[in-house]
Image (cartoon, rainbow, N blue to C red):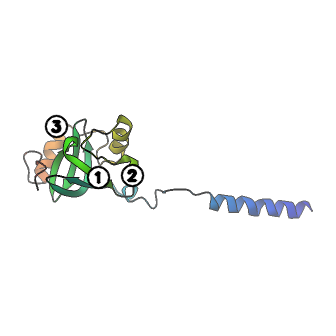
Amino acid sequence: MTRITSLLTVVMLACLNNGCMVGMTARKYRPAQSPQGVTMRVDTAQGTFSGELIEVRDAGIVVLADQKLRLLPYSIVLSSKLDQTDSRYEISNRTVPKPDVQAHLRLLSRFPQGLTPALMQQLLSLNGQTELSSPNP
């Protein structure tokens, strides 16, 4: 009887171990597989921008869209969608996201620690720019 009980216990533990995976895993989450930040689609009155989230600032976000680094102030963002990310972290209605949302977005960006002026100049140079582009397409 104890042998059967032991066997059943092992089988139940194996089933629990395999059946307890809930939500996204690092294996399925694309930003966890590369040094790039999350892909973001941002709708503004000036147009739609889709690209990598580079940096999150207090006044807006920097995205690499259409081979250009662009600063998109929160005041122009009508809506946004983050690839493989919960909708509670989206930016919308021309409002500054709450601090906890900004903190989460920073962690998803390519540069969660922010960009130093020297590093920003290097990125701009690599993209053939001298300054961040305006939101105009």
Residue 80, disc:
1
Q: Which residue is mark 2?
A: 87
Percent from the top left, x then y, of residue 13? 72, 58
What's the CA distance linking mark 3 and mark 1? 27 Å
Q: Is residue 94 left or right of residue 102?
A: left
Give whichever of 118, 58 is nearer the camera. 58
Look at the picture and state if 124 lies above or below 21. Answer: above
Q: Residue at x 25, y 38 (%)?
A: 57
Q: Residue at x 29, y 52 (%)?
A: 80
User: Disc 3 on helix, strand or loop?
Assistant: helix
For disc 3, the neighbor class at 10 Å (few under 14, some 14 to 19, many from 20) is: few
Residue 43: quadrant of the picture: bottom left
What's the CA distance linking mark 2 and mark 1? 9 Å
Q: Is residue 18 left or right of residue 25?
A: right
Amino acid marked by disc 3: Pro
Instruction: Pick whichever of labels 2 and 1 is earlier in the sequence.
Output: 1
Q: Residue at x 13, y 48 (%)?
A: 124
Amino acid marked by disc 2: Ser
Instruction: Pick whichever of labels 3 and 2 is earlier in the sequence.
Output: 2
Amino acid marked by disc 1: Ser
**Do tag 3 and tag 2 residues touch (Cβ < 8 Å)?**
no
Percent from the top left, x then y, of residue 19? 63, 61
Q: Residue at x 20, y 37 (%)?
A: 116
User: Disc 2 on helix, strand or loop?
Assistant: helix
Q: Quadrant of the N terminus?
A: bottom right
Q: Quadrant of the C terminus?
A: bottom left
For disc 2, the neighbor class at 10 Å (few under 14, some 14 to 19, many from 20) is: few
Q: Which residue is mark 3?
A: 117
Residue 128: quadrant of the picture: bottom left
Label count reads: 3
